[in-house]
């Protein structure tokens, strides 16, 4: 069972507990009844009754006192136990990790947990700085280029990331040959599709404009040729042919 499966099972268990959990109710309905000084078990609302009879001498004086105290206590909800999230500390500012914790409490049970998450981007920056300090400039750039954002930025700037010791145009040729090795391959495919689509639309528009221009030029040439032909025919029709005079030859 991998990490994500365990997390999913834990979440499902927590959701099930939240659904089936019920708040704890304190039953505090107790009743006390006192009659002539006798006490009974407390079973519900408090009720006290006192009957006292006093007789003095031969006189028939009777005093009766009755006290009824009734206390009704409604059901009270006991607060559920709280689950506190554990605190995580990196213990140092030079550690690329983050503490993540959480908790869930219900009326019956509570859960809490946490873990450290490694910040790969922070590690990449620190490694690049160390390589730069050692004079390994190409290696420093190469480890930064493992981030797709850096790779795209280097590509857009015209300075492609190194590829197996090659830099510049040679590295670009290798990236073009093996595009699947790019960290931004998915974005690269989308960008390439968009560029090809736009280029195809522009090419189609250009061809259409060229065809329209060629048709316009052909129509203009045909119009000019027709005008010249009509003008030539008109000039031919206006020419007057004059017969030359006969030449007399003296044979003497």
Image (tube, rainbow, N blue to C red):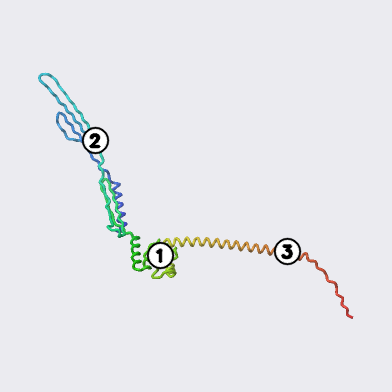
Q: Which image quadrant: the C terminus? A: bottom right
The residue positioned 34% from the left and 64% from the top of the image is: 129
Name which of mark 3 and mark 2 comes first in the sequence: 2
Numbered label attached to residue 73:
2
In the displayed structure, 15 sits above or below 211; it is above
Numbered label attached to residue 182:
1
Dot in front, 3 or 2: 3
Q: Residues within 10 Å of mark 1 (few under 14, many from 20)?
A: some
Question: Which residue in the structure is indicated by mark 3?
Answer: 231
Instruction: Please tell me whether mark 1 sits on a helix, a strand or a loop.
Output: loop
Label 3 – label 1 distance at C-alpha: 70 Å
Name which of mark 1 and mark 2 comes first in the sequence: 2
In the displayed structure, 108 sits above or below 237; it is above
In the displayed structure, 62 sits above or below 30; it is above
Instruction: Please tell me whether mark 3 sits on a helix, a strand or a loop.
Output: helix
The residue positioned 42% from the left and 64% from the top of the image is: 154
Label 3 – label 2 distance at C-alpha: 122 Å
């Amino acid at each position: 069972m991998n990490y994500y499966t365990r997390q999913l099972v834990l979440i499902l268990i927590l959701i099930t507990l939240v659904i089936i959990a019920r708040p704890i109710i304190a039953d505090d309905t107790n009743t006390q009844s006192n009659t002539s000084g006798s006490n009974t078990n407390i079973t519900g609302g408090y009720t006290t009754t006192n009957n006292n009879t006093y007789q003095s001498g031969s006189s028939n004086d009777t005093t009766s006192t009755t006290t009824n105290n009734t206390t009704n206590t409604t059901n009270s909800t006991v607060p559920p136990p709280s689950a506190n999230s554990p605190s995580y500390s990196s213990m140092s500012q030079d550690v690329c990790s983050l503490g993540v914790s959480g908790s869930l409490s219900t009326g019956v049970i509570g859960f809490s947990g946490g873990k450290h998450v490694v910040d790969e981007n922070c590690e990449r920056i620190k490694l690049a700085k160390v390589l730069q300090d050692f004079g390994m400039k190409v290696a420093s750039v190469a480890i930064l280029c493992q981030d797709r954002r850096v790779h795209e930025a280097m590509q857009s700037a015209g300075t492609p990331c190194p590829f197996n010791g090659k830099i510049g145009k040679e590295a670009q040729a290798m990236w073009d040959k093996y595009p699947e090795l790019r960290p931004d391959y998915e974005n690269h495919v989308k960008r390439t599709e968009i560029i090809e689509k736009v280029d195809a639309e522009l090419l189609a528009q250009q061809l259409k404009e060229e065809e329209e221009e060629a048709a316009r030029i052909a129509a203009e040439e045909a119009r000019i040729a027709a005008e010249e032909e009509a003008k030539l025919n008109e000039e031919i029709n206006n020419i007057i042919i004059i017969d030359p005079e006969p030449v007399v030859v003296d044979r003497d």
